[in-house]
Image (cartoon, coloured by chain):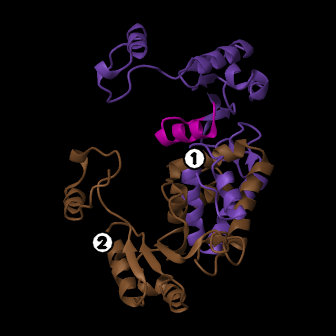
Chain colours: A purple, B brown
Amino acid sequence: MTQLPSVYLERAVDQMSQLPGIGRRTALRLVLHLLRRETADVLQLAGSLEELVQNVRYCQVCHNISDSETCAICSSASRDHTTICVVETVQDVMAIEATQQYRGVYHVLGGIISPMDGIGPQDLEINSLVERLAAGGIKEVIFALSPTMEGDTTSFYIYRKLPHEGIRITSIARGVAQNNQLHYTDELTLGRSITDRQPYKS
Amino acid sequence: MTQLPSVYLERAVDQMSQLPGIGRRTALRLVLHLLRRETADVLQLAGSLEELVQNVRYCQVCHNISDSETCAICSSASRDHTTICVVETVQDVMAIEATQQYRGVYHVLGGIISPMDGIGPQDLEINSLVERLAAGGIKEVIFALSPTMEGDTTSFYIYRKLPHEGIRITSIARGVAQNNQLHYTDELTLGRSITDRQPYKS
């Protein structure tokens, strides 16, 4: 790409193009769009990012993003605090909440064990999960990690760390996706859906 | 999308999703990515946007983005200041500069006449172009606007406003694109490329 006609433009494009999935060309388009907007609007955008990183907090219990010490889910009396769903990210909490099928609480690991990316168990909220269980009162832990090698490794690592007595440890169901054509399902998933077959419910 | 667990997160996602081509889901992904980055990095991004909108200037002559009163092109002694290429946007200047085929100067209109979008001639840098020509010394004006109805309307509007005596007024060539298969070229372009046929140069 040609040299940009302004150092300010250059810096802004450079910064924007560090966002995931945004190349220099897109960054330039976004930045030139911002230049056509009201100055106050752009200052508001910049300010919202500054406020976010300066004020964001994480729930002391489940490590979900929260504006208070304890998040809305962990402090809700209507949730089942004896069931903990273990997820990788804040987005996973939102995805599961959107299903409206879960009334327990969460534990956000903040990632997944991935030696390729240099992420080990010590980088994740695993010890705090062990402590939550050691404190007692938990009846079930549900693993809701990605159905990948890294996800399975992480589940297994945590499984070995957790106390097992009196605690049911489960994993979300894997199988053919709802409304997917059977013959388009990959071999591994289809194979596992047969070995993991369930009693028919009519 | 589910409600976000933090007002700061909500505000940042809301602001980011106002960028063109960025929906709420992508905005959330970008913002959560920023939360994983160093705080200083995010402050640098926000700062670069603030600096941009507070410090950006436009060349007094051609209205290209510039850090000084007159842009590098308009103040260059090696450019041909008797030829003005009229373009819509700053990006068009960069695109033409990238071809390395043009040694004249530019005039950035800042848009195109588009009644649908509420953009009239008064919103564009048309009067300043007329003044540049009235000041004398210009031998050629090249229209390099989009080959669309709006582009043609804008060219025609400006054409009627400009003094014609002693000034050659041209438009960039239209025709089949380099390396495009002929039978994939649209009818309008192909038809016009025949009526506008040029002497063969071997």
How many numbered marks does the figure carry? 2
In the foreground, B179 or A127: B179
Residue A54: image location, x then y, percent? 78, 54
What's the amino acid at mark 1? Gly
State whether residue B48 is above or below residue B116: above
SS class of the residue under badge 1?
loop
Q: Are marks 2 and 1 on the same chain?
A: no
Left or right: residue A62 versus residue B87 is right
* Residue at x 61% of width, y 17% of height: A168
- Mark 2: give few (<14), some (14-19) or many (20+) Cα within 10 Å: few
Q: Chain of mark 2?
A: B
In the foreground, B79 or B84: B79
Question: In the drawing, what numbered circle is on residue B149?
Answer: 2
* Residue at x 50% of width, y 84% of height: B129
Residue B73 visible: yes
Left or right: residue A53 versus residue B65 is right
Where on the picture, by quarter, is residue A89? top right
Residue A129: image location, x then y, percent? 74, 26
**Which region of the structure is painted magenta?**
A88-104
* Alpha carbon distance from label 2 to label 1: 31 Å
Q: Is residue A93 magenta?
A: yes
What's the amino acid at mark 2? Met
SS class of the residue under badge 2?
helix
Where on the picture, by quarter, is residue B58? bottom right
Q: Is residue B37 magenta?
A: no
- Mark 1: give few (<14), some (14-19) or many (20+) Cα within 10 Å: some
Residue A184: image location, x then y, percent? 32, 22
Residue denoted by label 1: A23
State whether residue A29 is above or below residue B136: above
Q: Chain of mark 1?
A: A
